[in-house]
Image: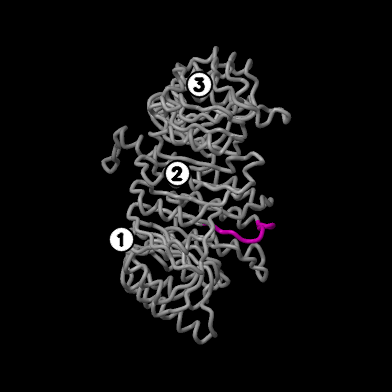
Amino acid sequence: MTENQIVLPNYLIIRILNILSKNILQEINQYLLIRKISSVCKKWKEEILVKILFNFNSEIQKLAEFQRFLALSERGLCINNKTINTKQLHFFTIENLLKKTKCHNFEQTKNLTLKFDFENVPKVLEISKYFKSIHTARVIAPITPQSAFMAINNTNLVELLHTGSFNNIKTLIFDQIHINENLDKLKSFQSLEMLQFERVVIKYDLLIEIIQQQSKITSLWLSSTPANETSKEVGSYDALFEWLKDNSTLKNLYLYNYYRKSNHSVLVNMLNNNTTLENLVASNLIADKSLPIIPIRNQTLQALYASDLTEYHCRSWQSLSNLTKITFSIFESEELELIQKYHYKSLESLIIEQVTNIDSFSSLLKSNQTITNLNIYKDFPNSNNEKKSYESAFIDALKENRVLKALSFGYSPSKNFFRDFFLLQHSTIITLTTPCNSFTETQYDIIQNQTLTQLNILYQKFQYYHDNVIVDTVLNILQNNRNIIIFKFISSPIETLSQENIDRFNSIIAERSNLHTVHFTKYFSPAETIMQKILNKYLID
C-alpha cells in the first residue's frame, strides 16, 4: 500500500454500495453489480454482498425466474420489492423447490408480495409457511374466464391471512373478485396499513361497511369498484366522504371510478372537517361552476387531484394551505395573489399551461417562494418581438431566484433563451427538461454550464440532421460536461451509428465514473441496442 492510499472501513463500503444498488433501475444491472462485487475478493463475496439491499421490482411468473430468486436467497442476499405470482407458477414444483432450498424463512427478503388465486388458498397456505413475513397479498380471481368475479370464500381467506407469515401484512389487494359477505375479521390485523379494491364486484353498502370497520388503515384505494353492472346506476361516494369528515386515521385516499359520480360540495365539506387526510385522488366529480365557489379551509391536505376540477378546487382555498403542487391554466395577477395569500407555505411544484402575464410571473420568481419545480407547457402567446421581451424578462427573473431546482418546458424556447440560460449558471437549478430545436447549435453553451446535473432533451425529430451528427452532439456533451450525471435524450429512432462513434461512446462511458443514467429512445434500433450494451457493461441505467 502506498502512502497516498486510503483504506475505507467496511461500513462505508457497504453504505456506498447500498446507494449504488438503490439507484440502479434495470434488473440486468443489478445482476451485473452482484457479479462485480462477488469477483472483488472472497471477503466481499461472503461478508459484504449479503449486507447490500438489491431492489428487484419485478414479478416472478416463470419457473426460471423463481429458481433465480431462490439462488440469490440461498446466497443470503437481501432482496427488496419482489412479487411472486403463484397464479402463473405450478404449486407442486414451487413447493418441491422450497423444500430443497437452504434458505430459512427468507429472512433477508424485504417487502415480499404474494399474488395468488383465492381458489388455491390451501396450496398458498402450504407454501406461505416457507416465508417469514409477507408484506403484501394480492388476492386475484381464478385463471379460468368462466370463474372470473367468483365470490370469495371469506372463511378460507381469513384462515390464510391469519397464518404466521401473513401476521404482519401491510397491504391487502382484492383484484377482480366478488365479495358478498362482510370481511369483519380483517380489523384484527394490527399491521394492515393499506386496503385496495380493483374491479371488485360488491354491493355499495357492503363496501362502505367494510371500509368503515377498518379503523386503523392509513391508505384506501378504490379502482372501478364496485364493478358490477348496478354501479352504472345513479350513485356516488358521498357516504364515504361523509364518513371521512370525522375519520382520524386515513391519510391517503385514491378513488378511480368513472361510473359513480360524486358531488364536489360533499367533498369540500369533508375537506373542511377532516384534519388527517394528506393525499386525495377523486375522479368523476360534478360541480356547477356557475354557482359561487364554496370556500375550502383545509391546512393538512398536501396533494389533490380531482380530474378536470383540480384547478377549480385549488382556486377555492381561503385559508393557509399545505398543498405541495398546483396547476394553473394561465398565470396572471390573480394566480400570483392566490399563491401569495394561501399557497405560499408548502408549495413545491407549480405547473402552468401558459404564462399570459410576464410581470406577475416575474414577480413570483423574484419573490423566492418555496417553489422548487416549475413546469410551463406552452410558449408565450404573442408576437416574436413580445416573445423576445418575455424570454428576456424570464432570464432576468431567474437571476434573482435562489430556490428553483428543476425547470421544465413543454415547448422549445428560442436558441437565444437557451444560450442565456446555460450561461446564467443558475446556482440552484440542477435539472432542465425541455424540447430543444437548437440542440446542436447550443451544445457548446451546454458544455460551458457548470450547474446542471440532469439534462432531459425531449420529443424532437431532428429531421434535418444525420444520426451521427446527433450522436456527435450527445458525445460532445457527455465528454466535456462532467457535471451532468443524468442525461436523457428522447428523439426519433437512432438507426445508424458509425464504428468511430461506437468506440468513442465506449471510451467516454468508461471514463465517466460519475455517470448515473444515460437514456436514449426506446425504439430498440440496432444502434441503440449497441449503446445499451455498453451502458450495461458499466452499470449505467
Give me the disc on residue 23: 2
| SS class, disc 3 | helix
Give me the disc on residue 158: 3
Ranked by sequence position, the earlier of labels 3 and 1 is: 3
Q: Residue furthest left?
A: 3
Q: Residues within 10 Å of mark 2 (few under 14, many from 20)?
A: some
Closer to viewer: mark 3 or mark 1: 3
In reply to whether residue 351 is colored magenta, the answer given is no
Residue at the spot x=60%, y=57% of the render? 501
The segment highlighted magenta reads: 488-498
Residue 471 falls in image quadrant = bottom right
Indicate whether 85 appears above or below 249. above
Q: CA distance from mark 3 to mark 1?
A: 45 Å
Do callouts 3 and 1 mark residues in contact (Cβ within 8 Å)?
no
Location of the N terminus (image quadrant): top left
Front-most of 320 and 126?
320
Ranked by sequence position, the earlier of labels 3 and 2 is: 2
Q: CA distance from mark 2 to mark 1?
A: 31 Å
